[in-house]
Image (cartoon, coloured by chain):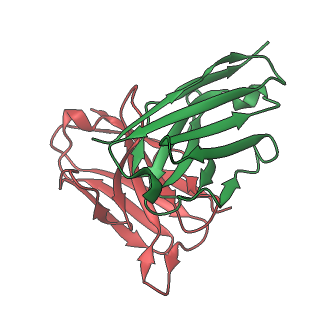
Chain colours: A green, B red
Amino acid sequence: QVLLVESGGGLVKPGGSLRLSCAASGFTFTDYYMNWIRQAPGKALEWVSYISSSGNSTNYADSVKGRFTISRDNAKNSLYLQMNSLRAEDTAVYYCASGLRKSLFDYWGQGALVTVSS
Amino acid sequence: DIVMTQSPDSLAVSLGERATINCKSSQSVLYSSNNKDFLAWYQQKPGQSPKLLLYWASTRESGVPDRFSGSGSGTDFTLTISSLQAEDVAVYYCQQYYTTPPTFGQGTNVEIK
């Protein structure tokens, strides 16, 4: 079955960096767009970034542009999110999500909590 | 960005009764070339990650019970749970995938009356 497992979350100080990973299995990774979507405590879902199946195309929410970088390693069936210059408002559960169509999220991981606090 | 607005924010329905959630987009998400609405619905149960229920406004994802249905076109959409079951307690989100950035509604919390 499809499995997306995030790792790398944790507590980081404002201005710090963190790298999230998402290990995928159970589907043909190279066929799918991959996304990061976040959810602040008690809040709605917010799309963060996507990367095309080949990795040639990426896009970001304005709130993270210039600070976050999405990447993928198709040989390892893995997705990454490098987060720099973190702010308190980046505190959230970060989900990786896959989709055959851009911006439609077929499968979701269980999420990784990122807390930005001094 | 397209703003998605759901109503109501919260809904309490008796077991076996109908639940109806509305979603309105700030601009049309109907793509004229294929006559499809780029609108999806997700279910997020307490403590879980979201799950795709419907896409193209009314197409059920594989395995989704047929008590869940979607309707509407253009800017106004509805998710209906025809006979609420205890396992349907969740927050439901609509989402447009017509343009980037994809955007979600604020969510509707469905509970048992």
Quadrant of image for the N terminus of chain A = top left
Where is residue A100? Give x, y as percent. 43, 60
The location of residue A50, given as percent across then percent down, is 60, 52
Q: Is residue A91 left or right of residue B40?
A: right
Compared to residue A97, the image places residue B37 above or below, namely below
Q: Identify the residue at horizontal 58%, vertical 43% (top origin).
A: A36
Relative placement, left or right, of B67 versus A61 is left
**Farthest-out residue, front:** A75
Number of numbered labels in the structure image = 0
Viewer-proximal residue among A72 and B3: A72
The single residue placed furthest to the left in the displayed view is: B16
Quarter holding residue B68 = bottom left
In the rendering, at what x and y percent does residue B12 appear? 32, 37
Question: Is residue A40 among the parts visible in the rendering?
Answer: no
User: Which residue is found at the position 73% from the left and 34% from the top?
Assistant: A83
Q: Does the rendering let one see residue B91? A: yes
Does A22 sit above or below residue B62? above
